[in-house]
Amino acid sequence: MGGEGRIVYLDNAATSWPKPACVSDAMAACMRESGGNPGRSGHRLSIAAGRVVAEAREAVAEALGAGDPLRVAFAANATAAINAALLGVLRPGDRVVADSLAHNAVARPLTELGRNGVAVEWIRCGRDGSVDLGHAEALVRGRGGRAARMLIVTHGSNVCGSLAPLGELAAICARHGTTLLVDAAQTAGVEYIGLDSLGDAMVAFTGHKAMLGPGGTGGLALSSRADIERVSPVIRGGTGSASDSEDQPAFMPDRLEAGTTNAPGLAGLAAGLAWIGANGGRESIREHERRLTENLVSGVAALPGAIVYGPEPGRPRCAVMSFTLDGWSCSDLALALDERFGVLCRVGLHCAPRAHRTLGTFPDGTARFAPGPFTTEADVAYALGALAELASEGGRS
């Protein structure tokens, strides 16, 4: 069994590939036909660029379940959006609660905030990636009536694919007056979020994964019940609005969106979301990816020496699965899959060491497969065949 030039891309949790052709087409058209600076000038090219950004904002709001597109503030990626939320809300003396599957996009800013007077507490998660809801409520409630200022949840684990119960976590926050921040980097665009149904909540999203847009796109969306004034701008600067004042505008999205917006990237993001809508919608793609993921889970689990981590078969999960193979180090396994078979995946700690400690896979990490909308059943069968061949060889640990 050899690759013979074939590529099976199973790294969609890092970034989706390939992108629909309409994405690059829309980006090129924006640069050719709408090349002005959005919201900065009154001429036709600036107005056209502003229209591109507005259309992307509307598309993202619809995808996230946000009723007001103006409550979507664009940023370079989900990491920038998470930092904007954490640094914009939390102050010395506050208490924040996060789950133990957190990506370093959450853990690193929380570590820094912890050094500067913010109390950081971690919710227990099981080795299947499940959130301990009782522990979550106890930490959010706190002692002596001092509830947490914010609860941060990983909606979809980038390591094992587990899905957090947003509705139940939002209810916990509502009982204690706590703001919910959802890290939806792995799920925005394909999983239901329903932002406005989550109460006082914010969602950090990226455009280059399930939304099928290009890199350099993402943002922070605030629910209809989130208090805009409680989120201080982390970056201040020109917005094209209220230019007579040296204070950052108090209204959204300008409050959280200083500097020139990435209009070509947002044109591609809107095109990616339009492609999803034209190809069966979010539900159809989610079902396709889940079916392939379950095939990967069952196929890998059947291999001698393989261990699959995360939710049990049939439990809710996004299109991510992790495993180890006896006799193979993760790095050697990935190299063999790539060079010999053209199967592309990610291995190691996936920028989430806390998650790997939770799963019991730290410090070596795991191999991760993540199918996407363009992955086929034949691709999955081929990847499983490649793994079976490597498993039979015993590998190099």
Image (cartoon, rainbow, N blue to C red):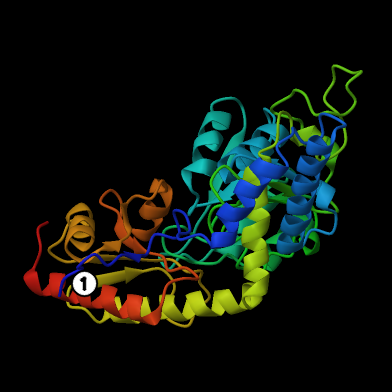
- Which residue is more in the foreground, 38 or 124? 38
Label 1 Cα neighbours within 10 Å, binned few <14 / some 14-19 / many ≥20: many
Residue 358 percent location from the top left of the image: 40, 56
Give the residue pinned by disc 1.
Answer: 387
In this view of the protein, which residue sits in the foreground, 162 or 56? Answer: 56
Q: In the image, is residue 356 above or below residue 236?
A: below
How many marks do you count on the picture?
1
Q: Position of residue 224 (x, y in %)?
A: 85, 54
Residue 320 sits in which quadrant? bottom left
For the N terminus, the quadrant is bottom left
Q: Secondary structure at mark 1?
A: helix
Q: Is residue 122 above or below residue 157?
A: above
Q: In the image shown, does 395 or 212 lie closer to the viewer?
A: 212
- Whether residue 139 appears in this view of the structure is no
Q: Is residue 36 left or right of residue 16?
A: right
Outermost residue, front direction? 32
Q: Quadrant of the C terminus?
A: bottom left
Judged left or right of residue 362, residue 263 is right
Q: Nearer the viewer, residue 180 or 336?
A: 336
Judge whether residue 208 can be spotted in this image: yes
Query: Residue at position x 18%, y 73% from top?
Result: 305
Give residue 228's position: percent from left, percent from top.
83, 40
- For the point 44% across and 53% down, which residue is it? 14
* Residue at point 56%, 53% (across, down): 24
What's the amino acid at mark 1?
Answer: Leu
x and y percentages locating residue 68 in the rendered image: 85, 54
- Residue at x-position 71% and y-position 60%: 64
